[in-house]
Amino acid sequence: MIKLLVDEPGAEEARRAYSDADGVRTTAIAHVEATAALTRMRKGRRLTPTQFDRALDDLESIWRGIFSHTVNGALLAMASETARTHALRAYDAVHLSGALSFATGEELDFACWDKELREAAKRHEFALIPEHLQTAQ
């Protein structure tokens, strides 16, 4: 989600995928992750106070149009299994488990720029956005 809010490699492709999507789904922790990433960017002076405030406002605006999966006991249990199966970091396992829950009965694209999470999503036959990562990322 951070690629929708700040300019960094992959941002244009993320914005294009977002605008072309027929609904966006994620887990509720995505809001926390985006807020934390923006705050760390501000702390590291990669964002000015004005850019930071604008990005937070944009996050709230975007979030209103996203369907988020509640993180509950069942999803966490699934995420624990997903973490073991794919050796993923905790939040990545939660995101993949959320996507698997959403995907029941429908085809979904999986937008991700993390190599390990992409590989796990690919094993579950998600179509990946972007189709290929640029080597510089």
Image (spheres, grey):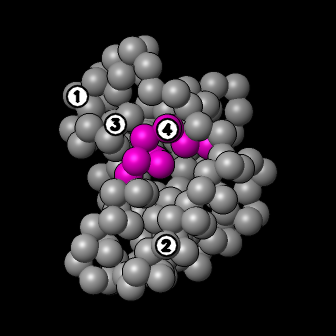
Specify which label sits upstream in the sequence, 4 or 2.
4
Which amino acid type corresponds to the residue marked 1 in the rendered image?
Arg
Question: Would you say 52 lies left or right of 42 here?
Answer: right
Which amino acid type corresponds to the residue marked 4 in the rendered image?
Ala
Vertical comparison of 105 with 25: above or below: above
Is any atom of residue 130 visible in this view? no
Residue wearing tag 3: 93
Q: Nearer the viewer, mark 4 or mark 2?
A: 2
Please give the name of the residue rendered at 49% of the width and 72% of the height, measured from the top-left corner: 53
What's the magenta region?
24-33
Vertical comparison of 36 with 39: above or below: above
User: How dense is the environment of label 2, judged by Cα within 10 Å: few (below 14), some, or many (20 and up)?
Assistant: some
Residue wearing tag 4: 28
**Res 68 → quadrant:** top right
Q: Which of marks 2 and 1 is in front?
A: 2
Specify which label sits upstream in the sequence, 1 or 3.
1
Which amino acid type corresponds to the residue marked 3 in the rendered image?
Ala
Q: Which mark is residue 84?
A: 1
Q: How many angstroms separate mark 3 from mark 2 (CA)? A: 30 Å
Please give the name of the residue rendered at 34% of the width and 57% of the height, measured from the top-left corner: 36
Q: Are marks 4 and 2 in contact (CB under 8 Å)?
A: no
Specify which label sits upstream in the sequence, 1 or 4.
4
Q: Position of residue 70 (x, y in %)?
A: 52, 27
Specify which label sits upstream in the sequence, 4 or 3.
4
Mark 1 element type? helix
Q: How many angstroms separate mark 4 from mark 2 (CA)? A: 21 Å
Q: How many angstroms separate mark 2 from mark 1 (CA)? A: 38 Å
